[in-house]
């Protein structure tokens, strides 16, 4: 995908976890980003930050 943000459904699918747990992951990552001064959107996470944090930076998207 080429969108800037991922929603819980996409995070859940990517990590093979439940949607409820995906929301917890999104909340945690958004808290980290807020502490660094970034603007976040509830229920969505920045795709590049997500990929970096779950160690997918070498994986090709799409």
Image (cartoon, helix red, strand yellow):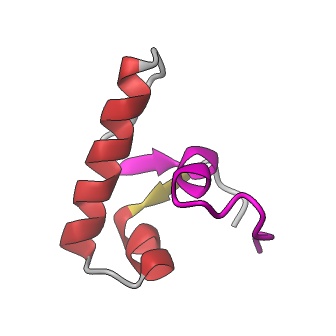
Work out whether residue 56 can be spotted. Answer: yes
Say whether residue 36 is magenta: no
Q: Residue at x 38, y 75 (%)?
A: 12
- Residue 34 placement: quadrant: top left
Q: Is residue 33 above or below residue 57?
A: above
Q: Residue at x 75, y 70 (%)?
A: 59
Q: Is residue 60 above or below residue 31?
A: below
Q: Is residue 58 left or right of residue 50?
A: right
What residue range appears in magenta?
A: 44-62
Q: Quadrant of the C terminus?
A: bottom right
Image coords of residue 42 (percent x, y) = 30, 41
Work out whether residue 43 can be spotted. Answer: no
- Give whichever of 53, 17 is nearer the camera: 53
Image coords of residue 18 (percent x, y) = 25, 80
Q: Residue at x 31, y 33 (%)?
A: 31
Q: Residue at x 26, y 74 (%)?
A: 19
Image coords of residue 51 (percent x, y) = 60, 57
| Residue at the left extreme of this rendering | 20
Say whether residue 52 is magenta: yes
| Residue at the front extreme of this rendering | 55
Q: Is residue 40 above or below residue 11?
A: above
Q: Quadrant of the N terminus?
A: bottom right
Q: How many marks?
A: 0
- Give whichever of 46, 49 is nearer the camera: 49
């Amino acid at each position: 995908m080429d969108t800037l943000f991922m929603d819980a459904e996409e995070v859940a699918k990517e990590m093979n976890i439940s949607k409820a747990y995906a929301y917890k992951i999104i909340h945690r990552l958004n808290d980290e980003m807020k502490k660094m001064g970034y603007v976040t959107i509830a229920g969505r996470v920045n795709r590049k930050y997500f990929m970096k944090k779950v160690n997918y930076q070498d994986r090709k998207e799409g």
